[in-house]
Amino acid sequence: MTTSQAQSFYDAVGGHETFVRLVRTFYAGVAADPELRALYPEEDLGPAEVRFRMFLEQYWGGPTTYSETRGHPRLGMRHGGFAVTPHARDLWLGHMRTALQESGMTDDQVAEFWAYVTRAAHFLVNSADPPQAVDTAEGPRATPDLIPVEETPRPPSR
Ligand code: HEM
């Protein structure tokens, strides 16, 4: 069944309680993940949890408290201060996947949410992985990729 016009996705998945549960599980994963945790500036993840939860609730048709308290989301700009690498994105998405699986949503609802969040996460990548991470991931094949394909053009010799 798809979400009818009368009922928002927010309502269909169980409203506030579902979003509280989802984002709490997500942030429990972030808190236990030293690599990802290092990106979050505040010692207390509680306020970040509330901001993210309000944003998601608003996006999916719930209360608009996010915009009322934070203004326009401008997610690209708001992530500009953090090095969101492909690796960080994948860690982030891993915790989101776990949280969705434990959220109590139906498979269709999880799929719809996942499609959105993966798209958004890919869009928010703003930094390259460090070369060491590439080496680890791809082994010896990574090295030739680091050599420029074209040499710097030289003036014609006379
Ligand atoms: C790609 C991986 C991502 C990383 C590593 C990441 C990291 C962060 C960090 C470090 C913060 C600051 C925490 C705070 O103080 O609020 C933040 C905030 C936030 N993120 Fe992400 N994020 C990612 C993806 C996403 C996605 C996909 C969304 C939306 C679908 C999102 C929505 C938000 C929102 C709404 C805030 C709070 C913005 C505000 O200040 O009002 N993030 N994120």
Image (cartoon, rainbow, N blue to C red):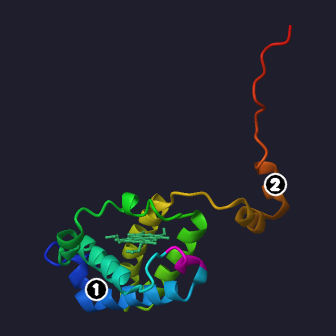
Q: Label 2 neighbourhood size at 10 Å, few (<14), some (14-19), many (20+)?
A: few
Question: Label 2 amino acid?
Answer: Thr
- Report which quarter residue 135 is drawn in: bottom right
Q: How far apart are marks 1 and 2 (CA)?
A: 47 Å
Residue drawn where x is 20% and y is 78% of the image: 62
Give the vertical position of 131 relative to 64 (above or below).
above
Label 2 within 8 A of ligand 1 by Cβ: no
Between residues 139 and 11, which one lies in front from this camera angle? 139
Residue drawn where x is 46% and y is 66% of the image: 121
Disc 1, SS: loop
On whether residue 102 falls in the magenta region, the answer is no
Q: In this view, does 8 lie to the left or right of 121?
A: left
Q: Nearer the viewer's eye, disc 1 or disc 2?
A: 2
Residue 66, horizontal then vertical, whole percent: 23, 73
Segment colored magenta: 35-39
Residue 99, horizontal then vertical, whole percent: 45, 86
Label 1 within 8 A of ligand 1 by Cβ: no
Task: Give the farthest residue toward the left.
Answer: 6
Residue drawn where x is 30% and y is 75% of the image: 56
The quadrant of the image that shows the C terminus is: top right
Residue drawn where x is 31% and y is 86% of the image: 19
On whether residue 38 falls in the magenta region, the answer is yes
Give the vertical position of 138 relative to 47 (above or below).
above
Disc 2, SS: helix
Q: Give the labeled residue for mark 1.
A: 13
Question: Label 1 amino acid?
Answer: Val
Q: Give the labeled residue for mark 2.
A: 143
Q: Is the magenta stretch mostly helix, strand or loop?
A: helix
- Report which quarter residue 20 is drawn in: bottom left
The quadrant of the image that shows the N terminus is: bottom left
Picture mark count: 2
